[in-house]
Amino acid sequence: MEWIEALILGILQGLTEFLPVSSSGHLELAKAFLKIEPSDDLLFSIILHAATALSTVVVFRKEIGFILKGMLKFQWNDEWKFAIKIIISMIPVGIVGVFFKKYVESFFDGNIPFVGGMLLITGVLLMITRFKQKNNNQQEGTSIANLNQNISYLQAFIIGLAQAIAVLPGISRSGATIATALLIGVPRSEAARFSFLMVLAPIFGATLLEFKDYFESPNPASLDISFLSIGFITAFVVGLIACYWMVELVKKRKLIYFAIYCLIVGLIALFV
């Protein structure tokens, strides 16, 4: 791996992890079209995912702090209710990870037509949200109480189903979860915040398991610390910007641009 490849992959991971264009799909396209192998070293892939997870923590540090502080009171309050909803949203992707991990991994084999088709589905899903009317009967806000008021336990589970489907390369996790939340009546600011908060535990959990697999492998590959640093710093900084940007774009109803992008890239992947 060269430093320019580490830089490119860091930028790609940071952008596509949060923008609704599918990070897994773009990494598969990178392997096929740019002759870059993003998974040639498991450790590098782990570092990139850890960097974007950390950027999410930084962006939503206030919400995370409020939730943890409220949970330490050991009362049935808004923070505990929200935490339960997060756990409920994790059930579908947890089932997929435990029982269908090998099956899902079989899709990550450079099957570009499949990725293109999934990108088209992502584009259509994002485009549908353009026609979703603004929720006039629900109040948007920044507190955990607002999140509890505007997201029910059933809605949390449905959004979790969207996250489970988004394990497929080409289906954007943020795009699928945010679009699903909007379509079932969740206000825009809450849809974006819930989408990013609900993924923290699965990402950190998967990262820890990947670290475990890496260190338990018979001959773990080594990588220059400079390449790891370049990838981590780039993914973290770009992810930080992309996460802030995505929250604002959802509020301003700008997902249509990403819908068009996914449709174009999906068609290119299918026909070129």
Image: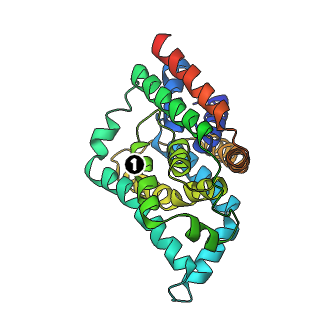
Q: How is the image coloured?
A: rainbow
Task: Using the image as rendered, state which of residue 239 and residue 40 is in the foreground.
Answer: 239
The residue depicted at 35 percent of the width and 48 percent of the height is 217
The residue depicted at 53 percent of the width and 52 percent of the height is 181
| Side of 112 relative to 259 (left or right) | left
The residue depicted at 69 percent of the width and 61 percent of the height is 58
Q: Residue furthest left?
A: 99
Which quadrant does the N terminus fall into? top right
Q: Could one spot residue 205 in this view of the protein?
A: yes
**Picture coordinates of residue 77 (x, y %)?**
55, 83
**Picture coordinates of residue 88 (x, y %)?**
41, 65
**Picture coordinates of residue 139 (x, y %)?**
67, 64
| Side of 149 relative to 11 (left or right) | left
Place residue 193 in its image quadrant.
bottom right
74 relative to 159, above or below? below
Few, some or many residues within 10 Å of mark 1 (<14, 14–19, 20+):
many
156 relative to 176, above or below? below
| Side of 110 relative to 187 (left or right) | left
Task: Using the image as rendered, state which of residue 203 and residue 225 is in the foreground.
Answer: 203
**Picture coordinates of residue 33 (x, y %)?**
53, 18
Q: Residue furthest front?
A: 137
Q: Residue furthest top?
A: 272
The residue depicted at 41 percent of the width and 45 percent of the height is 220
Task: Using the image as rendered, state which of residue 93 and residue 76 is in the foreground.
Answer: 76
Q: Could one spot residue 21 in this view of the protein?
A: no
Q: Secondary structure at mark 1?
A: helix
237 relative to 109, above or below? below
Q: Amino acid at mark 1?
A: Ala
Task: Using the image as rendered, state which of residue 49 and residue 70 is in the foreground.
Answer: 70
| Side of 94 relative to 130 (left or right) | left
Residue highlighted by disc 1: 164
70 relative to 25, above or below? below
